Every structure is written in C-alpha cells, then in structure tokens.
Image (spheres, rainbow, N blue to C red):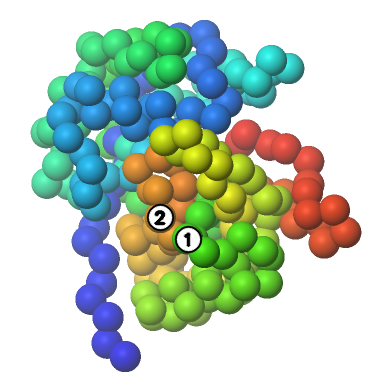
Amino acid sequence: MTTTPPTDRVDLEFKLVGTVVPRDHGYALFGAIARILGDLHGASWLAIHPLPGTPTVDGKLALQRRSGGLQLRVEPAYIPRVLTLAGKTLDIDGHRVSVGVSRIYALRPASSLSARIVVIKGFQEPEPFVEAVQRQLETLGVKSEVELGRRRVVTIAGDKVVGFGVTLHGLSDEHSLTVQRAGIGGRQRMGCGIFGPGTKVRRFAPSTGTAPETESR
C-alpha cells in the first residue's frame, strides 16, 4: 500500500520560567496555549511535548531550567504563528509560567524512539494495544520492534484516558523521521504520541501492569 509521507516538522523550544505545574498537565497546557494562539482544535500541524521536570509528592511537577522548556513540534509553515508565544504568560490550571526566547531544532533520526504516553481510542489492554500500534506503523510504512512501557492515565476534559509508554527499536533513519513527524495515536496536542530519541520509558510489567515512574524525555 502506498502512503503519503508525513509533512516535515521541527521542534521549537521556548525557555520557560516557573516553579511547578500539575503533573497531569497536557490538557491544561493545550488550553493555555490556545488562549494565546487562538482556536487550535483540529490543528494537525501541532504537537505539544510533555513538560520536563521532577515529580513532587503532592502531584505536581517541579520545572527545571536545565532540562528544557516548552517544546512544540510544528510544521515549518506555522513557525511564525507559534513564535508569538514568546513573552507571554501561560496559566496552566492556576500555575503561571513565563515563556521566553525560542530555538528551532531539526528532527534527528535514531534507531530507537520513545514516547512517554501513547493513546489509541478503544485499546486499553497491553496485547491489543501493541497490535494497534503495529497497525499504525504499517500504515506509515514503518518497520520496527514495539516495546511496551508502563500503563499511564491522563485527564482530558474531565475524562480519564488510558495509554502506555512506547519505545520503538530497529528503525532506519527514514522510518525514524517518519514516526517523529507523524506520531502514533491521538491527543498529540496534549502531550501524547510524540516520539523522540531522548525519551525514557519503563518496561511494562505483566505481573502488575505497572513500572517505576519517570518524567524524563
């Protein structure tokens, strides 16, 4: 089957000044950005990385300046639109953070890529979920070994959405870039399904369905 290659993308990273945000912040972060950039529903050109930081005991995420900031994966044509975030303040569920200057990074291929969480509607159990990921990879024309990470739950518009960390191994350079451009699954504007070479996930533990937590990208 012939598939249309996904549109090229870049990562645009803004410095971020703040202290803490909710640990489960994907939906709130999307809303905060949309209040500045305007309606982003259906904006397939945009994916928003989870914010990096250190989990706290009270369910927050402590931001760390050295571990990166606000990172958006965008089609190059939309760079001017998102650059208007610089100098603005984001209200992330009551936690205010300031957006600073930005840098643009080209996507780089790697033989292994990971996403902190991937969600695919209708698939919440490990084996069917892996099969659903493989089908999406086949649609993209990508060959890869799929490693399942821990089960995760995120809140989107008040609903609990179940997904898993995913790592892909054995990717060619071409296939690695394809996955990074297209992503896997839905909710990519809310931190899901975004792959990169620097992300770390824990393996799924069949006996418990869990694994130790990590927030590293």
In the rendered image of this protein, does residue 8 appear above or below residue 4? Answer: above
Q: Position of residue 156 (x, y in %)?
A: 45, 38
Residue furthest front in the image: 158
Image-quadrant location for residue 109: bottom left
Q: Is residue 143 left or right of residue 80?
A: right
Q: Position of residue 202 (x, y in %)?
A: 72, 49
Q: At numbered mark 1, what does the secondary structure look like: helix, strand or loop? A: loop
Nearer mark to the viewer, of 2 and 1 = 1
Q: Position of residue 179 (x, y in %)?
A: 41, 63
Residue neighbourhood size for the residue with mark 1, other residues' Cα within 10 Å, grouped as few (<14), some (14–19), many (≥20)? few
Q: Amino acid at mark 1?
A: Lys
Q: Earlier in the sequence, mark 2 or mark 1?
A: 1
- Picture residue at 64% right of the left edge, 45% below the top: 152
Determine which residue is flagged by label 2. 186
In the rendered image of this protein, does residue 143 appear above or below residue 69? Answer: below
Q: At numbered mark 2, what does the secondary structure look like: helix, strand or loop? A: loop
Quadrant in which the N terminus is drawn:
bottom left
Determine which residue is flagged by label 1. 121
Is residue 194 among what the camera can see?
no
Quadrant in which the C terminus is drawn:
top right
Mark 2 vs 1: CB contact within 8 A:
yes
Image-quadrant location for residue 128: bottom right
- Picture residue at 52% right of the left edge, 64% below the top: 122
Image-quadrant location for residue 39: top left
